[in-house]
Amino acid sequence: LILAISLLKKANISELFIKIIYMNINILLPIFLYKCLKLKYSKIESIYLFLFSLIVFLSPTFRSLIVWPDSRILGVTIFTISIYYFIQFQKKKDFKNAFLNILFYTLSSYISPNFAIFAIFFVYVYYKEFGFFSKNFIIIIILNILLSLPALYYIFI
């Protein structure tokens, strides 16, 4: 994240413009929180789920870090998107949603390493769903290994 911001500053992009972009990206958090709630709790009226998703704006951490580029809020935002695709996968059993879930939780893990532990949970769920020797599970394992190679390189070399 810091590298991306420094590249934008070297390109003579103003700090205000960077903050506006960052703020607009982080506005996705309550939007995807609402979408997750709507998928998971479809029997509850949408207005209640919408109001509940707006609770994010009451958080002083969210309000203070939404403008200042910080890896924690961006990581939570991208991880919420991965949760959305995971819930979609649970409902539809579509491999495309599993792929998008893996892609987004890996991205959130690179932005904020706190989310890396969730890879174990997701792989376990996909193992239970597909079985160990299925084509889809092998693709999931290979995808996780490929996406984790830069982190493994950083840790060990």
Image (spheres, grey):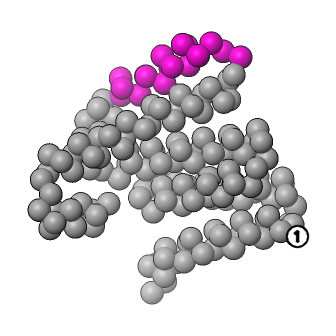
Residue 109, image x, y percentages = 49, 59
Question: In the image shown, does 135 or 52 lie closer to the viewer?
Answer: 135
Asked whether, in this view, residue 61 is left or right of residue 7, the answer is right
Depth check: 113 or 23 in front?
23
User: Seen in the image, is 123 located left or right of residue 72?
Assistant: right
Left or right of 116 on screen, residue 93: right
Residue drawn at x 87%, y 61% is 131
Residue sitting at 37 percent across and 41 percent down? 26
Image quadrant occupied by the N terminus? bottom left
> Where does the image place residue 5, in percent across and percent down from the top left?
24, 60
Residue 154: quadrant of the picture = bottom left
Few, some or many residues within 10 Å of mark 1 (<14, 14–19, 20+): few
- Residue highlighted by disc 1: 133
Magenta stretch contains residue 32? no
Q: Is residue 89 above or below residue 114?
A: above
Circle 1: element type: loop
Q: Is residue 58 magenta?
A: yes
Bounds of the magenta segment? 43-59
Residue 47 in view of the camera: yes
